[in-house]
Amino acid sequence: MTSHDLPSGDGPRTGRPKRRTFSAAYKLRMVEEYDAAEHGDKGALLRREGLYESSVQLWRRQRDAGELTAAGTRPPAAKKEKTPEQAELEQLRKEKARLERQNAAMARKLKQTEAALDIMGKGIALLETMSESADTENS
């Protein structure tokens, strides 16, 4: 089936399912039900609700960290404004990391070049030795 065979609509994502969102109360209830369920019933709960175990594990971690409460999720902490010195320091650190990566790449390339030159030198020496032995045999 090509893209031309697809049913036309408002756009390429027409009919595509939307991502589900869950309330904090639902997440807490599912974590509690999952933890209370017997081993064989946990899979049935996940299938019935259409959930993955990884989602329940994430919600459990959020609950344990205090990020998930009955009132809802905790609002993210407000970001502090950086001082000009902090911004400059961060920029310098990024530049240093970039230069270190570039330096490491150049060091690898130098090592490869040195190895290639060493091999070429040995090849030339071998050819000279063969040429000298051929000259002595022909004389």
Image: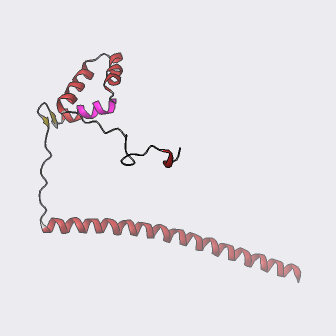
Colour setup of the view: secondary structure
> Majority secondary structure of the magenta segment?
helix
Report which quarter residue 37 is drawn in. top left
Say which residue appears at 36% left-offset and 21% top-offset.
Answer: 43
Identify which residue, 101 or 121, lies in the foreground: 101
Q: Where is residue 122 in the image (x, y as percent from the top left)?
A: 66, 73
Say which residue appears at 35% left-offset and 38% top-offset.
Answer: 17
Q: Tell whether 35 sits left or right of 130.
A: left
Magenta residues span 52-60
Q: Tell whether 81 sits left or right of 40.
A: left
Q: How many marks?
A: 0
Q: Where is residue 57 in the image (x, y as percent from the top left)?
A: 28, 31
Identify which residue, 10 or 111, lies in the foreground: 10
Above or below residue 67? Residue 45 is above
Identify which residue, 80 or 2, lies in the foreground: 2
Say which residue appears at 33% left-offset and 24% top-offset.
Answer: 46
Q: Does the magenta stretch include residue 83?
A: no
